[in-house]
Image: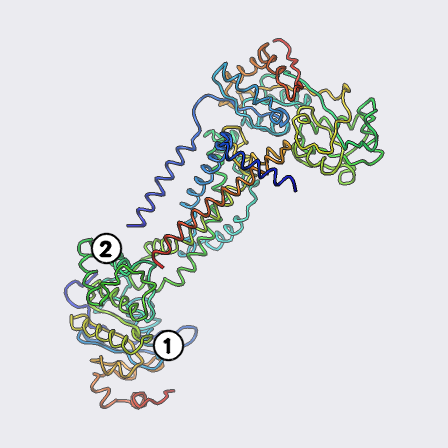
Amino acid sequence: MNDFSQAFLKAIQLILNLDPNLIEIVALSLRVSLTAVLIASLIGLPLGAALALYKFFGRGLLVAILNTFMGLPPVVVGLVVYLILSRSGPLGALGLLFTPTAMVIAQVCLITPIIAALTRQTILDANNEFHAQLRALGAKSLSMMNTLLWETRYSLVTNVFAGFGRAIAEVGAVLIVGGNINHNTRVMTTSIALETSKGNIELALALGMILITLSLIVTSAVMSARHAAYNVYS
Amino acid sequence: MVMTSALPLPLKIQHLSVSRQGKLLLDSVNATIESTGITIILGPNGAGKSLLLRIAHGLERPDAGSLRWDQHIPKPEESWRTFVFQKPIFLQRSVLANLEYVLSLHKVVKIRKNLLIQQALQHTGLVKLSAQSARILSGGEQQRLNIARAWVLEPKVMLLDEPTAELDPSGVATIERLIKKIAQQNTKIIMTTHSLDQAKRLAHDILFLHQGRLIEHTPAKVYFAQPQTSLAEDFLAGKLLD
Amino acid sequence: MNQYLANAIAVATLCILLTSVQADKSPFITLSSTTSTENSGLLDYLIPKFRERTGIDVRVVSVGTGRALKLGEMGDTDLILVHHKPSEEEFMSKGFGIQRREVMYNDFIVAGPSEDPVNIRGERSIARVLSLIHEHKMPFVSRGDESGTHKKEMELWALAGVDAQRYSGEWYHETGAGMGTTLNIANGMSAYVLTDRGTWLSFKNRDGLALLFENDPPLHNQYSIVQINPDRHPHIKYTEAELFINWLTSGEGQQTIADFTLNGQQLFFPNALPQ
């Protein structure tokens, strides 16, 4: 397994040299995926909570769709977003294809169902615990929802980062809608795919290691922040 | 908030019936509860006491009959009436934030909020614990906070569902002291209990429920001295009721 | 109040992130190229020189010839740089393109396990080479992705009189992937493979693969650039795209192509006709 040790050395070397290409790619990866996570959360958290708390026509169907979409193949999402953003598609006039914004849109489509479905379950559980008490205290449905979202914030952060993990790691969707354009839409995963296809297995593996490390850093930073906050009131 | 100055009493219960899953839980209950003193809803487990109290707060709906606070059907969001659960659930926040939360729900302005919170903390002896997480309080402290949370709104009526069922004797004594104090400040108390001794110590009048039916509604003195029914007699004698 | 504060922070962060993601506004055109031109590094060498000259950036989306043409048809690219003449001519005849110029060429080669079990090294024609592979049922890896290379490969099989796709899954393997990935697979399977010389020379993971057959006229690999018809897609950057074509086929552009080498070896040979 000489490849691994060489890739490992290469990864260290890239990091220590602060390779400008690497920094650009890492920064874009983070920017795209964090933006996607933020937007997906703004949609997915209230949507998940509403699905848990409100009864309305078509709710069952919506929940079934969400649960199915949790496992959407990124390539399919990429293709659909491509067809929508293509100059020949309905939103072609915006000229968003092959831009970071297109990548954000694709990732939002990919992870909103994940965040919403997980949030629904979290809020459902919390509602079982809190509903009668909050109702008795005089909470109406909207403030009930806000309270439950806030009370479960630590679990919700975990849900959100499940979405982040998927966003930063996927390649199929961003490759199709981003185009893997150097200095424009090239991110970690598309670089790894590219270097693999060029036969630069070592460099590809090194980038893979950096991607995993990056995910680890972001996740553990969030977890320790969560832990610190949790300790104050528990 | 229909009533502001006058008490929203008497509480009129007419032919109130509730069944759940084919079982009749309240069977045509009729009663009028007046505005003074502590009213105890007494009865063995499964008599329908908690259900009656929940209907009085608007948490459940009757299937037939009516329950009115001076003509008025209760809704849980009314701030003149508060409800205390046997087992409270607190938010994962401090004692103080839990009290503040209730006041925010009812849109109490900030200056008044602080005043009410300080009062409630003092009354219940929780001043020193105000910054602590509500979730790590002892059982007795939790029940004091539970009362404080209901008291902080300065309600005209407080409904308490078995508030001492999970407490040790000293905890029971503390909570009973608090309940008496609240009643003295002109808050109408209606509470359920299955404890005869507690009813003796607190009650001005007693609604005795058994298997969903109101067996008798009498002043406490009458109830304990000369029960009007054989069921009440048996309950007082500690016999198993069927 | 905590909730509102948290919401406010979230919204503020969102705004910052969104503005930072917005693409910069300097002029650019989009070029879909085959993977061979991108992976060899040729475009990374050409584009900065063009940008220096004109201030226009060229954003390269590298895909197979089939998809590059599709992107052009849908108006998602201003230019395409591909290498399959029949497809290009069909594209032009349908009115998707407004001009097509031949730019440069290199050639295809056959690579395979360095032991060369059926000894194609000594053969004189590509038709004979493919016949040998067929006769001995030697593993052969094909792109199978409608790319220019794949289409060329199909033409070569026809030349050899072999219907290779009939043997798909037996000794003939279709990867449905790019040239690099296909070479990786050929390496792993010790299989024969047709590849363009540019990708071959820049490919790093050769291991047991060797160049076994080359220099036969049918292996000529012509690259052309096609400009998308703005009549069909009004947002197409016609003027800028035309500038690029003119530069690429000019003396300066052609010289730049000739100057590009990898390990001292020239990869592409300019052959644009003067306009």
Farthest-out residue, right: C135
Rendered view: B56 above or below C57: below
Q: Amino acid at mark 2?
A: Lys
User: Which mark, by number, is residue B123?
Assistant: none
Disc 1 target residue: B25
Q: Amino acid at mark 1?
A: Leu
Q: Quadrant of residue B180?
A: bottom left
Residue B210: percent from left, percent from top: 33, 82
Disc 2 target residue: B107
Does A230 sit left or right of C145 as displayed? left
Asked if residue A46 can be seen in this view, the reply is: no
Q: Earlier in the sequence, mark 2 or mark 1?
A: 1
Q: Residue at x 33, y 47 (%)?
A: C6
Say which chain tag 1 marks. Answer: B
Q: Quadrant of the N terminus of chain A?
A: top right
Q: What is the spatial separation of the Cα atoms under label 2 and label 1, in whole angstroms?
A: 36 Å
Q: Residue at x 45, y 56 (%)?
A: A121
Rendered view: B74 above or below C190: below
Q: Nearer the viewer, residue A108 or C39?
A: C39
Q: Nearer the viewer, mark 2 or mark 1?
A: 2
Residue A150: percent from left, percent from top: 36, 53
Does A226 sit left or right of B152 as displayed? right
Tag 2 near tag 1, CB within 8 Å: no
Q: Quadrant of residue B48?
A: bottom left
Mark 1 lies on a secondary structure that is strand
Does C268 sit left or right of C136 as displayed? left
Mark 2 lies on a secondary structure that is loop
The residue carrying pointer 1 sits among few (fewer than 14), some (14 to 19) or many (20 or more) residues within 10 Å by Cα, namely: many
Rendered view: C270 above or below A11: above
Q: Quadrant of residue B3?
A: bottom left
